[in-house]
Image (cartoon, helix red, strand yellow):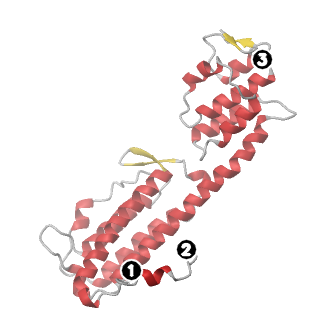
Amino acid sequence: MPCGRTEIAPEVRTSEEFSALPGWPRHEQEKRCAILLDEAPNHNRGAHREKALSDGPESGREFCARSARSIAVMTDAAVQCFEEVEALCPAPEPCGEILNEARDPMNEVATHYLEEARRQLRGHKRMGEGALAQLRDEDFFVTLDPETNSIAILVKHLAGNMRSRFIDFLASDGEKPDRFRDREFEIAPATTRGEVMSWWEEGWACVFSAIDPLQPEDVMHTVTIRGEPHTVLQAVNRQIAHYAQHIGQIVFLAKHLRSSEWKTLSIPRGKSEEFKKVKPRTPRP
């Protein structure tokens, strides 16, 4: 089968076999780099040979660079492809130089994601604490009807989830064998406000002890939750959404219970127009 300057045998599939073909010109090596990169997110090696059979309109170097920069975050498969690419491209101008340039924006995106995830989580914690601080001791244990949860139960559930998901975050399943989720919705009559707040602090300590040390290269690492694989990005997003839901419930209940004594945690009613005139603040960390 013709492929520009050479012919590819149908059985050839790996980068090593491609690079070993006689008469393989530099242009085609660079094109192979591009093929590896283009397929890196899915690591679909079965498609590599088919792609190599058609000549692209761009030069190998341009296509290689474009493909490299199209990968927003390095997956484990992409890392392996990068290594193959660097082995394929010889001096004096290896494609590896282009790939190294591409790694910087990838890390920048991952770094920004982690910073934003930490900022949102700390924001949710502050929001919850702004509501909890306004409660009387007895308010923690009020249920509006038999099917609703009290604020104490919501905090206990959050803490149980945080402990399970974030202890040994990168190395063990997010549903720990010693977690008994149903018990998180049971509150002993003797439970105190102090105990509830201890659960709150202990849960968030688990979150930040796992999130704060994460590095950009961890973002596409695979973790599991109940055996289901997630990237770190997916797992963190899943928990941010979960915690936002329950903290919203806490704020709603606290506002209901405090009624006219409630102090708003956002823009006060009737003050939106005034808020437009306030100088924008730097986002809180």
Numbered tag placed on residue 129 in the rendering: 1
- Kind of residue at disc 1: Glu
Q: Residue 176: give x, y in percent of width and height.
A: 36, 55
**How far is disc 2 from disc 1 in space, using C-alphas?**
18 Å
> Is the C-beta separation of discs 3 and 2 under 8 Å?
no
Residue highlighted by disc 2:
283
- Kind of residue at disc 2: Pro
In screen coordinates, is 82 left or right of 128? right
In screen coordinates, is 223 left or right of 67? left
**Which residue is at a point 22% across and 83% down the rendered structure image?**
257
Residue 262 drawn above or below residue 14:
below
Secondary structure of the residue carrying numbered label 3: loop
Residue highlighted by disc 3:
24
Picture quarter with the N terminus: top right
Foreground residue among 165 and 22: 22
- Kind of residue at disc 3: Trp
Which label's residue is closer to the chain start, 3 or 1? 3
Which label's residue is closer to the chain start, 2 or 1? 1
**How far is disc 3 from disc 1 in space, using C-alphas?**
65 Å
Foreground residue among 134 and 223: 134
Residue 130 drawn above or below residue 202:
below
